[in-house]
Amino acid sequence: MADMQSYDIPLHDIKPIVQIEEYSLYYFLGLSFFAVALIFGLSYLLFSWLKKRNRYNKRKEHFNHLNMLDLKSTKESAYAITFYGATFKNDSLRHKEMYDNLVGRLEQYKYKKEVEGYDSETLGYIELYKGMVDV
């Protein structure tokens, strides 16, 4: 066999291999983490919005009952105003005073077997109390 000699030939056109730092894995992991956090954040906001939207609102329900009362059936509406109006009596001192005044006026319509219709002053108090309530 031929004698294999190693020839050290200088190469002038080829540069040596340079180490290049690769960060694409870190970029991918950071972007993935951000996307997962964004998805969890948006799903939490959507869940809380849906939960809040479907929640039963006692104040709103009682306000609707107060506004839909038939004031011609005096005895039943007097009991209903006392019951539904109690929901709003603790909103402020003014609401409490107005509620107590209204309940005092409604007492004469509750405990009798036969009652006549509301007088105009009591009707005015009822409408004023319904106007004070905010939901």
Image (cartoon, rainbow, N blue to C red):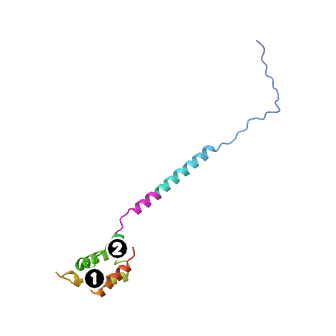
- Left-right relation of 35 to 9: left
Tally of numbered discs? 2
Q: Is residue 1 above or below residue 10?
A: above
Find residue 58 and name its label.
none
Q: Nearer the viewer, mark 2 or mark 1?
A: 2
Q: Quadrant of residue 19?
A: top right
In the orientation shown, which residue stands out farthest toward the left?
113
Cα separation between marks 2 and 1: 17 Å
Q: Which residue is mark 2?
A: 63
Q: Position of residue 63 (x, y in %)?
A: 34, 73
Whether residues under marks 2 and 1 lie with C-beta atoms below 8 angstroms apart, the answer is no
Q: Is any atom of residue 86 visible in this view?
A: no
Q: Which residue is mark 1?
A: 103
Q: Which residue is painted at 41% across and 63% down in the image?
A: 53
**Span shown in magenta:** 45-59
Q: Amino acid at mark 2?
A: Phe
Q: Amino acid at mark 1?
A: Val
Q: Quadrant of residue 70?
A: bottom left
Callout 1: SS: helix
Q: Which residue is painted at 34% across and 81% down in the image?
A: 127
Q: Position of residue 128 (x, y in %)?
A: 36, 83
Instruction: Quarter of the image for the N terminus: give it.
Output: top right
Q: Nearer the viewer, residue 117 or 90?
A: 117
Q: Is any atom of residue 35 visible in this view?
A: yes
- Of the numbered discs 2 and 1, the one sitting upstream in the chain is 2
- Left-right relation of 115 to 86: left
